[in-house]
Amino acid sequence: MQLLGDLAAWHILALGIFLLFLQFIAREAGFWYGQRSLNANVKKDEGVNVIVGAILGLLAFVLALNLSVATSRTAERRLTSLQEANAIGTSWLQATAFGPGHGETIANLLKSYADERLAYIQADRDSPMITEAIAKTSELQTQIWGHLIVLLRDNPGPQSTALMTSLNTTFDASTAMRFAMIYTIPPQLLWLLLALNLCGMGALGYQFGLIGKHHRWLTTMMNILLTVLLVEIVDLGNARLGNFRGDTLAYAWTEQSFQPIPIPTAP
């Protein structure tokens, strides 16, 4: 699985080519063995059709299962990123309501906090930026909480308590986001899918070998479609591979909202 991840990290197309190559090998090996059996005058058995159909049906089921898991991972990451971005924005608004002093300092720190969270989401697989963003996030949380403690002592009341609750939600959201970014498709499911795919292609090639017809164009089209689905499953299920990465749109909107708030004068 490390090899597949490295290929996808290098270029998602490289992963597709590698998977397509494996399918070609399995198909041609099955066809060769089927031709060998045909030349040896092995009596045709209708049970082969049943077995091939069963393998392909099982492949379709596991393919749908993996696709469902992968799409759910993507949906979870998007929802978690939206919740964290909203929590940061809410905390910033509540901090600015305190005016100059510790409230304003917390608001400024939250701007840097949003930048670090955005950097964490955008970091590539195995990038040192991931560790750096996590460390910086923890440091900013400590600084923000320190200013909050002073604010609670100087200004006890519902406004300070509301800010404390909001900041606690913001910090909890960062943990949830980190979990969502790390939690990918179980490798056992991907290995099962890959094994069934290769077995299915080998069995299909064997079936064609027994009848002496290869149908290369049709099987190649099938291999390409299966490869596209396999690549999309790997892409969707991993937050730092390919094109379907962690969604940063909500963070960008939150950072755009960090604008000075005009205070209206009393009528």
Image (cartoon, rainbow, N blue to C red):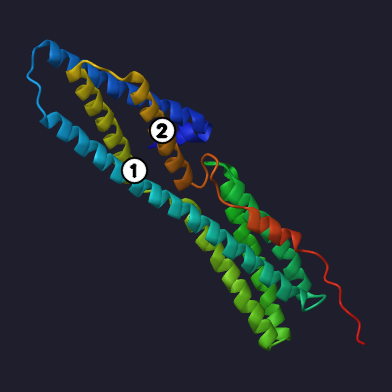
x and y, in percent, of residue 59 in the image: 28, 40
Identity of the residue drawn at 9% across and 11% down: 40
* Residue visible at 16% across and 13% down in the picture: 36
Q: At x 21% / y 15%, what residue is drawn?
A: 212
Q: Is residue 21 visible?
A: yes
Figure check: 146 above or below 6: below
The residue where tag 2 is placed is: 225
Would you say 98 lies left or right of 89 here? right
Question: Is residue 22 depicted above or below 124 in this figure?
Answer: above
* Quarter where residue 102 is shown: bottom right
Amino acid type at image mark 1? Leu
Q: Rounded to the nearest whole Å, what is the CA distance between mark 2 and mark 1? A: 12 Å
Q: Position of residue 252 (x, y in %)?
A: 69, 55
12 horizontally vs 39: left or right: right
Q: Is residue 9 left or right of residue 102?
A: left
In the image, taking residue 157 as reference, residue 259 lies left or right, namely right
Q: Position of residue 74 (x, y in %)?
A: 49, 52
Crowding at dot 2, Cα within 10 Å, few <14 / some 14-19 / many 20+, comes out as: few
In the image, 153 versus 29, the foreground residue is 29
**In which quarter of the view is residue 152 placed?**
bottom right
Q: On screen, 149 above or below 221?
A: below
Q: Residues within 10 Å of mark 1 (few under 14, many from 20)?
A: many
Q: Residue at x 41, y 26 (%)?
A: 18
In depth, the one of 217 and 68 nearer the eye is: 217
- For residue 7, the mark is none
Q: Quadrant of the N terminus?
A: top left
Q: Nearer the viewer, residue 156 or 212?
A: 212
Q: Amino acid at mark 2?
A: Leu
Q: Which residue is mark 1?
A: 63
The answer to which of marks 2 and 1 sits earlier in the sequence is 1
The part of the image, by quadrant, that contains residue 190 is: top left
